[in-house]
Amino acid sequence: MFDKLKDTIKELAKTAVVKAEDALGSQKGQQKKDMAIKYIVSHIPVFAPLKPLISMLLSSFIDDAVEFAVEYMKSEVL
């Protein structure tokens, strides 16, 4: 279950980073990261009452997925 969920989180992170960049522009790194994390948690395909638990259990993974998505986006721009 967690492997499929982690794959979904990676894909959500890419979308979340693009949406945060479009919404906030540059020079607001922490705000964009927070926005991306909120987007991911709100779109995780699990039963709503479980989202806080899943988000807590996978918080480090979600954070890493956002960082990876940022690096991926930067490499695509170049």
Image (spheres, rainbow, N blue to C red):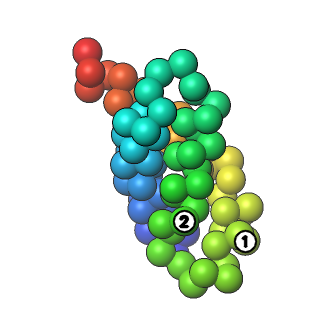
Q: Is residue 3 visible?
A: no
Q: Nearer the viewer, mark 1 or mark 2?
A: 2
Give the distance between the C-alpha atoms of the residues marked 1 and 2, in whole angstroms. Answer: 12 Å
Q: Amino acid at mark 2?
A: Ser
Q: Residue at x 57, y 84 (%)?
A: 47
Q: Amino acid at mark 1?
A: Leu
Quadrant hosting residue 8: bottom left
Numbered mark located on residue 42 in the image:
2
Position of residue 44 measured from the top left corner of the image (x, y, whole percent): 51, 68
Position of residue 77 measured from the top left corner of the image (x, y, whole percent): 26, 21
**Left or right for 54, reference 24:** right
Position of residue 34 measured from the top left corner of the image (x, y, whole percent): 62, 43
Which of these two is toward me, 56 or 33? Answer: 33
Quadrant hosting residue 32: top right
Where does the C terminus fall, quadrant-wise? top left
Q: Residue at x 32, y 22 (%)?
A: 75
